[in-house]
Image (spheres, rainbow, N blue to C red):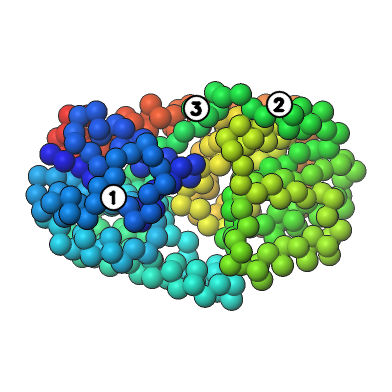
């Protein structure tokens, strides 16, 4: 048996790239395993060209592990010619409505991607759908029999980079800061809830006297100028220019410093198929306040502070965490247990191998 993992782009330091890399490492221990991608930016896997891919796809004993998170016309073309067993690793695709009026290309690609999801679910009657979350599975459950849907969280590298040395200067500045340090990690895009983050910050500043600063780690998309302007204009309207810092893309050591030096992880994202930064916050023992949308509640698990739409409630939550040690400790412990019991690589490997062993008798 040979196995090929497919995705349009395989890169370092993102959730899907990490998932592919770790899956590859596990499968490579027992089988011939390869990766096929149009854009190859992760050097820890072995890539193959079209000819080798087509050869693997024509053998019904082989397995294709197709990571689906974007519209990929060429990938679908390869699948439709395949005789191999197909496993769809579904990471979700952002609903196109979030990009309407902001970027026509993003809107179109998301719409095409979600239509492709339905098409793949309908047409590949024998395929297994390996979804990151039950929330993701909802996108295909109308078209796929229950026995062909399984849930496996995405693999992560949190323990690997979390054991490294942080950027000491940044960490020192954060720990000695006289402000409450809020953190959000995620690209600057309309589904990530940045405007509501500013609403919470404004509510806090109006109702409490403590100094506070929000740091947002994640790159700006130059293709979203209208959304970026909305953020900047709301900051000016609220007078929050000194209370918000956009960090951009950073390396692991720097990101680790922001996790270790922050007081609260604040997430008001409107759409997440899983949301790896939540479990990163759990691992680094930062209390989380999050909005109850999409897969967020499922990812965070029990005894977490998950709220609805009242911005004052989020501000009050920050105040309570900073002033009531028992509440803070409870949230930290719940997060620590959530990560340790569900999302270590050891735990995810058990789930992943268990599913493949049950479905395909792979002996992993």
Q: CA distance from mark 1 to mark 2?
A: 39 Å
Asked if marks 1 and 2 touch (Cβ < 8 Å), the reply is no
Crowdedness near tag 1: few (<14), some (14–19) or many (≥20) residues, C-alpha within 10 Å = many
Asked if marks 3 and 1 touch (Cβ < 8 Å), the reply is no
**Label ID, residue 168:** 2
For marks 1 and 2 on the same chain, the one whose residue lies earlier in the sequence:
1
Residue nearest the observer in this picture, 221 or 260: 221
Q: Is 205 situated left or right of 268 in this image?
A: right
Residue 123, compared with residue 167, is above or below; it is below
Residue found at x 85% / y 50%: 242
Residue found at x 32% / y 52%: 37
Residue 330 visible (yes or no):
no
**Residue annotated with mark 1:** 36
For marks 3 and 1 on the same chain, the one whose residue lies earlier in the sequence:
1
- Mark 1 residue element: strand
Crowdedness near tag 3: few (<14), some (14–19) or many (≥20) residues, C-alpha within 10 Å = few
Residue found at x 43% / y 60%: 93
**Label ID, residue 159:** 3
Q: CA distance from mark 3 to mark 1?
A: 27 Å
């Amino acid at each position: 048996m040979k196995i090929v993992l497919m995705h349009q782009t395989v890169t370092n330091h993102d959730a899907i790239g990490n998932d592919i890399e770790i899956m590859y490492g596990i499968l490579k221990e027992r089988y011939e395993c390869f990766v096929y991608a149009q854009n190859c930016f992760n050097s820890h896997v072995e890539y193959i060209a079209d000819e080798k891919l087509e050869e693997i796809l024509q053998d019904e004993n082989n397995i294709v592990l197709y990571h689906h998170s974007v519209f990929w016309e060429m990938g679908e073309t390869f699948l439709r010619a395949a005789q191999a067993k197909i496993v769809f690793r579904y990471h979700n695709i952002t609903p196109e409505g979030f990009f309407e009026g902001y970027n026509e290309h993003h809107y179109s690609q998301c719409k095409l991607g979600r239509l492709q999801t339905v098409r793949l679910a309908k047409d590949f009657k024998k395929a297994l759908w390996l979804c990151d979350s039950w929330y993701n599975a909802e996108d295909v459950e109308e078209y796929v029999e229950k026995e062909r849907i399984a849930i496996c969280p995405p693999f992560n590298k949190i323990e690997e980079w979390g054991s490294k040395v942080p950027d000491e200067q940044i960490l020192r500045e954060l720990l000695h800061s006289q402000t409450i340090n809020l953190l959000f990690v995620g690209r600057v895009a309309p589904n990530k809830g940045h405007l509501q983050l500013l609403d919470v910050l404004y509510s806090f500043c109006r109702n409490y006297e403590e100094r506070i600063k929000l740091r947002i780690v994640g790159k700006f998309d130059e293709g979203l100028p209208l959304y970026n302007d909305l953020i900047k204009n709301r900051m000016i309207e609220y007078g929050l220019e000194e209370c918000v810092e956009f960090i951009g893309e950073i390396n692991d050591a720097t990101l680790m410093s922001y996790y270790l030096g922050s007081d609260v992880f604040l997430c008001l994202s409107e759409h997440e198929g899983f949301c790896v930064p939540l479990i990163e916050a759990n691992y680094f023992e930062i209390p989380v306040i999050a909005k109850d949308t999409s897969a967020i509640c499922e990812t965070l698990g029990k005894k977490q502070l998950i709220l609805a739409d009242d911005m004052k409630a989020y501000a009050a939550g920050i105040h309570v965490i900073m002033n009531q040690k028992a509440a803070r400790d409870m949230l930290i412990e719940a997060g620590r247990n959530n990560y340790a019991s569900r999302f270590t690589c050891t735990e995810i490997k058990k789930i992943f191998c268990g599913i493949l062993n049950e479905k395909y008798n792979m002996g992993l």
